[in-house]
Amino acid sequence: MESDNVREGLWPIRKRVDKVQYFLEHHNGFFYILTNAPVNDTEMMTEGYYLARCQAEKSLVDRWQIVTFPGSDCTIQDMDIFHDNLVLFLQKNRTPLFCSINMPIDVDVQEPKEVNDLNPWYFPIPSNMCSIIPGSNNDFMSSTYRLVVSSPVIPDLTVDYDLRKRTFTILHQEEVTSLSANLGTVGKSNVSSIQQNLQLVETSQSWSDLSKLYSCIRIEVISHDGVLIPLVILYSQEAHRHGESPGILYGYGSYGEDLDKSWCSERLSLLSRGWVLAFADVRGGGDLSWHQAGTKANKINSIHDFAACGMHLIKEGLVHQNRLCAIGCSAGGLLVGAVINMLPDLFSAAVLKVPFLDICNTMLDPTLPLTVLDYEEFGDPNIPAEFEAICSYSPYDNLSSGVCYPPVLVTASFNDTRVGIWEAAKWVAKVRDITCTSCSKSVILKTNMQSGHFGEGGRFMHCDETAFDYAFLMKALRLDDITIA
């Protein structure tokens, strides 16, 4: 729509196409479009996004120029446009990257370029396992881009990147009072570990991490079909005992969401007790292709991926075979619940927080708030093949009679509009009814009568919930460092 001619109405850039997405930004007479649309009319949609542009004139919006493809082993996740710079959020080998490209961009219409051909500046970051969250970058004329950077061993950093000078400034890093004496510095050699052609910054600044105390490694585990699944493993160098330590495996694997692996001080109490914390980025999360590999009929891939990661932790001696636990929230509860049905002996305890356990009945009720939207994620039960796929892994429908199930803490919220309170209640009741009678006594339902899907607000209530979860796991494993009245 033209601001000086609002009566003309909105302009359609392109007709809507199933599963094709468009994200538009305006810059200097052009619309820049991040999309997975077919490159030409005969092709299917692309596996990831590429960047195109068209002139911001009604008669020319259908004439697209392709600006850049991401390149091999790389995907474009998002973009921000400023007066003098384009900032791209990338993933390379499932590792987050940010880069800046000078604007305006000169494009050869006949030969679209890869990102590296546009002289990008890759933002230096301290580790290839960092979580990166953009700050409030709302000033179009600004040449400074703010990020919040952290990792399992790097407390939150607030960093300003000067896009014009290609330098950075560390504004603040979260202080960890009890561990401040053990903070180490990460120099320029580690900054370049993400990508070989990363341009280093001549600066005396450094960021602090806790790698002297805690090891954080990223490996790849072979799943049932040969696909490599990223697994991030965190443990204390002093307290960990090979082949003896307890551990927790976290998973989610839905809606294209990655697991949160940013800094979390709550983990320190477990790490100091020798626990291993592992984060499985199973299919169903992540970028577009990784997400689609774990949706609908492919959802079973997520479940096998999670099981493979758990078995790897035990096989390699990182966790004792009788001390591996699992935690899944919401759709992650579906993941953990399905693996418990498949391999009841894999986990010695589990925590399912507001879990999506009765997927068959929920997906058959279109009056529920999210059911129809979830057809794209889990499948449409009105299609027989997709309904059979859902039934094949549904945690509620695949409970095995007489089988010994591990201790499980199931939490539910009365005011949850995303996952009905009845799902947790039904699952717990059925476990107690049909599984091993002695084991089912260790399956506990905890219901919060005030909160919603994300729990009660406030830092202290969140700490209470986390402490309860940890206490349950310690008691279930019969560890000696917790006293039960």
Image (tube, rainbow, N blue to C red):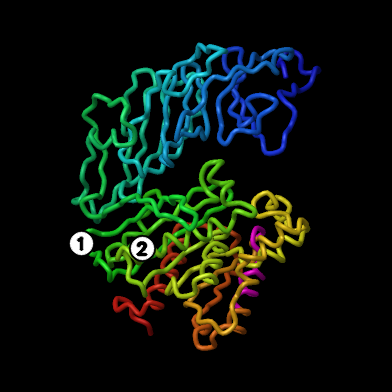
- Residue 200 or 316: which is nearer the viewer? 316
Residue that extends furthest to the front in the rendered view of this protein: 226
Q: Is residue 218 left or right of residue 332?
A: left
Is 374 situated above or below 403? above
Q: Which residue is mark 2?
A: 313
Question: Is residue 456 in view from this perspective?
Answer: no
Q: Quadrant of the N terminus?
A: top right
- Residue 156 or 96: which is nearer the viewer? 96
- Residue 70 or 84: which is nearer the viewer? 70
Residue 420, magenta (yes or no): yes
User: Which of the numbered marks, if any, corresponds to residue 368?
Assistant: none
Q: Which residue is mark 1?
A: 238
Amino acid carrying mark 2 in the image: Leu
Main secondary-structure element of the magenta-colored stretch:
helix
Is 36 situated above or below 332? above
In percent of the image, x 39 and y 69: which residue is there? 324
Q: Quadrant of the C terminus?
A: bottom left
Is 440 situated above or below 161? below
- The residue mark sitting in front, 1 or 2, is 2
Label 2's element? helix
In percent of the image, x 47 and y 32: which residue is there? 89
Q: Which residues are magenta?
A: 417-428
Q: How many neighbours does mark 2 have within 10 angstroms: few (below 14), some (14-19), or many (20 or more)? A: many
